[in-house]
Image (tube, grey):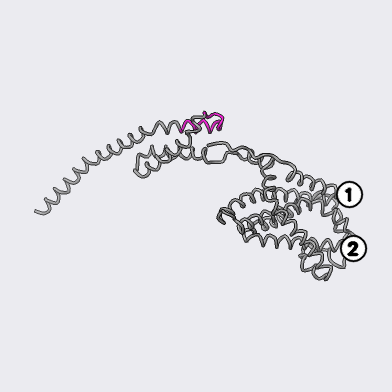
């Protein structure tokens, strides 16, 4: 008796589900249609505005549509949220996801393409960022000059300090006790330019590594960045003493100026950018430490992009003009030209920031 009863209950259950399932589907479809009909006009208007922006930017948008764009975007985003929560039909959900994504890019996405960004960077953005960290540049310059003086004084008192400051791979024949002829040979030129391109690549890698390290160490309140500057300039001070003691101070300065006015300037900016981050974290003012670090980090990153460009230029100068131009006067002229160019670009050339556009 129990088996027939159970069978009847199962049959009744399936019969009831067959009736309710189409009803549920119809109800869901009705809710989806009503939801779409109530909001579709706003979606279509937003889609039309976004399509015009994608084709021609803001110039093709009327003022009324431009003012309505943020509201229409928020409406579409809210509709997408509701559609996800209530499991509306897949077509509506896919349409809203695509629309919101496109609208987000137009409202909040970047306004400049690669070439437009590069043009703005070279024609004002980089120099503005450098001028904004002028105080850190002054501090870093003072530290670098002090480091060179310290290196000079250390080797003057004890020549053994030269070996402690100068790595073996950089010393080569440049060492205390070397003859004037040996030292002069290290300042000479190479016959031909074979192998100089690979030498340039090596120099760029080495110099860029020093600059990036000086910038990256800024998070520790800038102290490691300053220490790195002191160490590198102490090495230079030791070399200055070595060549000056052999009566080759002018020749060494000319040899160094070819690439040094660019390379040392780049190292100065890298150290200043790292110090800028560290100083803003140590003295955030009314901002939080994270907010201060984020702001200074973005500014420092702009400076560092330019520093990489300077390291490329310095590597080229070190590998080619310095190795192929042997005249002391000619070397001084090359160094002076690049020093004047960088100073003019950073501190004399000024261009206002582009006006902000968009909603």
- Which numbered circle lies on residue 246? 2
Query: Magenta stretch: dominant SS?
Result: helix
Q: Is residue 56 magenta?
A: yes
Q: Give the magenta range.
A: 46-62
Residue at image coords 75%, 59%: 144
In the displayed structure, does residue 159 sit left or right of residue 270?
Answer: right
* Mark 1 surroundings: few (<14), some (14-19) or many (≥20) residues within 10 A: few
Q: Residue furthest front?
A: 286
Q: For the residue labelled by badge 1, is the local secondary structure a helix, a strand or a loop?
A: helix
Residue 177, given in percent of the width and then of the height, sits at 87, 68
Q: Nearer the viewer, residue 40 or 275?
A: 275
Residue 267, given in percent of the width and then of the height, sits at 72, 55
Q: Which residue is mark 1?
A: 329
Residue at image coords 40%, 31%: 41
- Name above or below for residue 270 compared with residue 346: below
* C-alpha separation, residue under disc 1 versus residue under disc 2: 20 Å
Q: For the residue labelled by badge 2, is the local secondary structure a helix, a strand or a loop?
A: loop
Residue 277, given in percent of the width and then of the height, sits at 63, 55
């Amino acid at each position: 008796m129990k088996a027939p009863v159970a069978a009847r209950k199962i049959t009744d259950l399936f019969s009831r589900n067959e009736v309710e399932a189409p009803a549920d589907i119809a109800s869901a479809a009705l809710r989806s249609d009503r939801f779409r009909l109530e909001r579709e006009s706003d979606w279509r208007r937003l889609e039309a505005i976004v399509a015009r922006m994608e084709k021609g930017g803001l110039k093709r948008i009327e003022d009324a549509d431009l003012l309505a764009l943020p509201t229409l975007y928020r409406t579409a985003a809210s509709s997408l949220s509701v559609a996800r929560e209530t499991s509306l039909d897949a077509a509506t959900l896919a349409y809203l996801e695509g629309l919101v994504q496109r609208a987000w890019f137009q409202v909040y996405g970047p306004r400049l393409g690669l070439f437009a960004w590069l043009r703005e960077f070279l024609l004002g953005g980089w120099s503005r960022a450098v001028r904004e960290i002028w105080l850190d540049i002054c501090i870093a310059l003072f530290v670098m000059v002090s480091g060179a003086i310290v290196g000079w004084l250390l080797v003057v008192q004890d020549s053994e300090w030269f070996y402690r400051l100068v790595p073996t791979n950089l010393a080569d024949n440049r060492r205390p006790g070397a003859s004037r002829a040996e030292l002069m040979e290290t300042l000479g030129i190479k016959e031909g330019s074979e192998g100089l391109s690979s030498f340039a690549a090596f120099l760029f890698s080495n110099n860029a590594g020093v600059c990036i390290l000086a910038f990256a160490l800024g998070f520790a309140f800038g102290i490691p960045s300053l220490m790195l500057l002191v160490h590198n300039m102490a090495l230079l001070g030791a070399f200055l003493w070595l060549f000056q003691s052999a009566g080759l101070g002018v020749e060494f300065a000319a040899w160094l100026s070819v690439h040094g006015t660019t390379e040392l300037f780049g190292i100065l900016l890298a150290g200043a950018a790292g110090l800028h981050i560290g100083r803003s974290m140590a003295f955030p003012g009314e901002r939080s430490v994270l907010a201060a670090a984020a702001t200074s980090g973005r500014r420092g990153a702009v400076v560092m992009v330019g520093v990489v460009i300077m390291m490329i230029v310095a590597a080229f100068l070190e590998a080619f003009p310095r190795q192929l131009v042997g005249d002391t006067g000619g070397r001084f002229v090359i160094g002076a030209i690049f020093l004047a160019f960088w100073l003019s670009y950073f501190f004399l050339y000024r261009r206002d920031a582009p006006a902000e556009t968009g909603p």
